[in-house]
Image: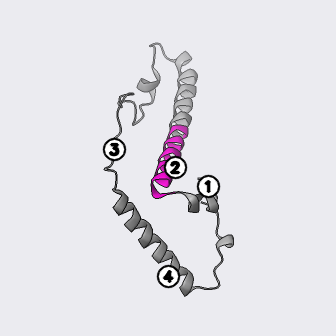
Amino acid sequence: MGMSRSDFCACTPAEFAAAVKSWREAEESRRRDAWERMRLLALMTVQPHVKQRLSPSKLMPLPWDGEAKAAVPEKAEPCTAEESRRRLAALLEARRRQSSESPSSSLSSSPSL
C-alpha cells in the first residue's frame, strides 16, 4: 500500500479502512485500464482483416462490460464509537501480548505495509 509503519500506527481504524478502500479502488482501476488497452489493441489489429465493423466489447467481452457506470456501492454499517474503542483495545492487547512473548522482536525491522 505504500504506507509507512508510523502512518499505519497513527491511523484510526476508520482512517485505515478508508485508505484500504481507496487503495483497492485504485488497483482495480489500474487493472481494468490495462485490460481495456489490450482489448483496444486487439481490435485495431483484427479490424483490417474482417469485413464487418467490430466493437471492443464484441471482440473481447470483459466481466465489467455489463456494469452500470453510476452503480452505487453498498455501504457497510458504520460501527459505533464504543465498538471502535473495543476493537482498538483488543488490537492493542493482542499487540502487547505478542511483544511480551517475543522480546527480541523489533518494530523497526518490520516491513512497511
Helix, strand or loop: magenta stretch: helix
Q: Label 4 belongs to which residue?
A: 97
**What amino acid is at disc 1?**
Met
CA gap between label 1 and label 3 equals 24 Å
Q: What residue do we see at 64% from left, 73% from top?
A: 107
| Residue span colored magenta | 12-30
User: Which label is found at residue 75?
Assistant: 3
| Callouts 2 and 1 close, C-beta under 8 Å | yes
- In the image, what residue type sits under mark 3? Lys
Q: Is residue 73 above or below residue 57?
A: below
Mark 3 neighbour density, 10 Å: few (under 14) some (14–19) many (20 or more): few
* Mark with earlier residue (4, 3): 3
Q: Earlier in the sequence, mark 2 or mark 3?
A: 2
In terms of secondary structure, where does tag 2 sit?
Answer: helix
Q: Which amino acid does the dot numbered 2 rest on?
A: Ala
Element marked by disc 1: loop
Q: Which mark is residue 19?
A: 2
**Residue 53 point in image, percent of width and height:** 46, 14
Indicate left or right for 27 with 62 as reference.
Answer: right
Locate residue 94 relative to residue 75 in the image: left or right: right
**Picture quarter with the C terminus:** bottom right
N-term-proximal mark, 1 vs 3: 1
Residue type, mark 4 in image: Arg
Q: Are marks 2 and 3 in contact (CB under 8 Å)?
A: no
On the image, the x and y values in percent for residue 98 come to: 52, 80
- Residue at image mark 1: 3
Question: Alpha carbon of mark 4 to alpha carbon of mark 2: how far?
Answer: 27 Å
CA–CA distance in space, label 2 to label 3? 15 Å
Q: Is residue 86 magenta?
A: no
